[in-house]
Image: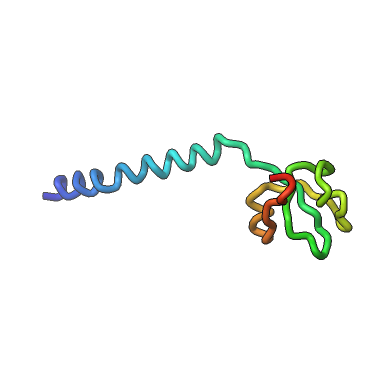
Amino acid sequence: MKKKLIVRILLIFLPFSFIAFDKAFETIASPQELVWICTGKYSKRYHATENGCKGMSACKGEKLQVTLEQAEANGKTPCGFCY
C-alpha cells in the first residue's frame, strides 16, 4: 500500500520537478542583460548604451551599468529612444 502511494506521489510531482530544473538551468545558462541608468533625481528610464542616447547625455547624476532586473526593481522603465 505504501509503495503504491509513493509511486502515485512521484508520478504527480515528477513533471513539475523537470519544469523547475529547466527554468533554473535557463536562468543560469543565459547571461543577464545589462542596461544603463542615471542616478539623477528625476531619472525614470533605463538605456541600452552609456552615451548613445540623448536621455543619457542629459544625465545630471552618475551613470551606472546594472542588470535589467535591478533597473526594473528600482522603478525604471525602458527608454523610448533606445528600445
Given the current orientation, which residue lies at the most extreme bottom position?
41
55 or 46, which is in the foreground? Answer: 55
Percent from the top left, x then y, of residue 40?
Answer: 83, 60
| Rendered view: 77 above or below 83 | below
x 54%, y 41%: residue: 27
Give the residue furthest to the front.
Answer: 81
Q: Quadrant of residue 31?
A: top right
In this view, which residue lies farthest toward the left? 1
**What is the x, y in percent for residue 67?**
68, 47
Does residue 38 appear to the left or right of 11 in the view shown?
right
- Snapshot colouring: rainbow
User: Is 73 left, or right, of 53 in this rendering?
Assistant: left
Residue 60 locus on image (x, y percent): 88, 58
Lateral position of residue 72 relative to residue 53, left or right:
left
| Residue occupying the point 44% across, 38% down | 22
Q: Quadrant of the C terminus?
A: top right
Residue nearer the viewer, 44 or 13: 44
The residue located at (64%, 58%) in the rendering is 73
Please count the marks in the image: 0
Question: In the image, 39: left or right of 8?
Answer: right
Q: Residue at x 50, y 38 (%)?
A: 26
Instruction: Locate residue 7, reporting x and y percent.
Output: 19, 44
Near-viewer residue (28 or 78): 78
